[in-house]
Image: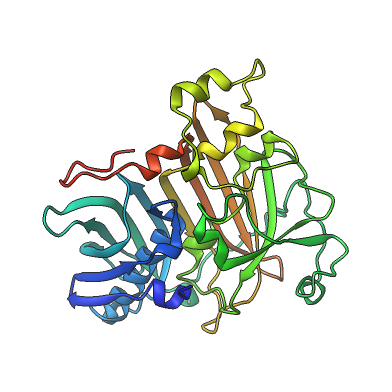
């Protein structure tokens, strides 16, 4: 498997155009994982502010907003940057991801705001905020050996052959189960020993077990949705009186991101960190659409990043469908 660093390697073509190569092992089905793509956007912004905009001394992304217009694909990708507002304290750039060189199509677009978090000054006030409900305590030294009394390692995620991007991290979940069905708490680290850096936060805020699948019961099917043939109409017929599909139908779902927002609260050290805590929570799951609120903490309990998503619940065949050539291809 490719490393995060190699998978998010960015090559400049000129002062405002960059390229990357999306590999298979960072995909969900046939589509590059949304969090991985977000990290590529962060990597492009980081490089752009280190080179073209180096004189502004704004190395840190404060906020990111991405709109996923259509399915991206493996292979070459081009990122085109437009400097929208360049300022003394913050600067904003627009980035468009395009693919298909014969007939380029925009697939993901976004705005990124950069600043210098280390140089920030101003009013600071205590809010007494804390996780509610509180997450179980942890000792990461014991976590590493899967001996923490409150957390246990999940050997693999559901449908690993389909959700290949999930193979790059180790997941640790509460031994007594999640606190609520619509909430997931986890500690994660890279499987190969790499460290989480600022650019990897895009991947981190989109890498957790699907909240929707907590409603299927305790016996998830470990199978590839790509091998199923259930149609959307059949899925609708399978939904029970309580609105929850039977276990046999869960393998057919894909959860594409429509939009992703990210706010960085704390700069990680340049060498990165081994462990991060993530809480993801849905407030409403209705009519095939859900919201997701994501909180990322470090080992000291400091907020590293906040994120919000809007996602759809679709049949997996929408992920695996053949792409047509042209700028209008790949609609969700």
Residue farthest to the left? 102
Give residue 38's position: percent from left, percent from top.
40, 59
Between 215 and 121, the one nearer to me in the picture: 215
Query: Is residue 264 among what the camera can see?
Result: no
Quadrant of residue 318 within the rendered picture: top left
Query: Is residue 124 among what the camera can see?
Result: yes
Q: Is residue 139 above or below residue 260?
A: below
Q: Residue at horizontal 50%, vertical 71%? A: 121
The quadrant the C terminus occupies is top left
Q: Residue at horizontal 48%, vertical 58%? A: 263
Give residue 301's position: percent from left, percent from top.
71, 65
Quadrant of residue 100 within the rendered picture: bottom left
Residue farthest to the top? 241
Q: Is residue 227 above or below residue 205?
A: above
Give residue 91's position: percent from left, percent from top.
31, 65
Residue farthest to the bottom? 271
Between 95 and 23, the one nearer to me in the picture: 23
- Left or right relative to 8: residue 175: right
């Amino acid at each position: 498997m490719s490393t995060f660093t190699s998978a998010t390697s960015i090559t400049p073509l000129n002062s405002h155009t960059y390229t990357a190569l999306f590999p298979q092992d960072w995909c969900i089905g046939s589509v590059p994982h949304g969090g991985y793509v977000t990290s590529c956007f962060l990597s492009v912004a980081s490089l752009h502010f280190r080179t073209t905009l180096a004189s502004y001394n704004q190395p840190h992304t404060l906020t990111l907003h991405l709109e996923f217009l259509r399915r991206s694909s493996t292979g070459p990708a081009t990122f085109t940057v437009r400097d929208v507002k360049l300022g003394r304290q913050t600067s904003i750039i627009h980035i468009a991801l395009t693919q298909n060189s014969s007939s380029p199509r925009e697939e993901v677009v976004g705005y990124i705001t950069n600043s210098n978090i280390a140089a920030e000054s101003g009013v600071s006030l205590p809010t007494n905020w804390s996780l509610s409900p509180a997450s179980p305590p942890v000792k990461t030294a014991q976590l590493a050996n899967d001996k923490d009394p409150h957390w246990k390692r999940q050997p693999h995620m559901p449908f690993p052959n389909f959700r290949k991007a999930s193979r790059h991290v180790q997941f640790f979940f509460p031994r007594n189960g999640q606190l609520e069905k619509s909430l997931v708490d986890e500690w994660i680290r890279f499987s190969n020993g790499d460290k989480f850096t600022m650019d990897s936060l895009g991947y981190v805020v989109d890498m957790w077990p699907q909240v929707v699948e907590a409603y299927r019961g305790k016996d998830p099917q470990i199978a590839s949705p790509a091998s199923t043939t259930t149609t959307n109409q059949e899925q609708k017929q399978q939904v029970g009186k309580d609105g929850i599909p039977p276990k046999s139908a869960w393998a057919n779902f894909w959860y594409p991101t429509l939009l992703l927002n990210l706010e960085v609260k704390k700069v990680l050290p340049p060498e990165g960190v081994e462990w991060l805590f993530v809480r993801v929570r849905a407030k409403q799951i209705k009519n095939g659409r859900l919201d997701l609120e994501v909180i990322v903490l470090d080992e000291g309990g400091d907020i590293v990043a906040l994120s919000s998503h809007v996602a759809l619940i679709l049949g997996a065949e929408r992920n695996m469908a053949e792409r047509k050539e042209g700028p209008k291809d790949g609609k969700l």
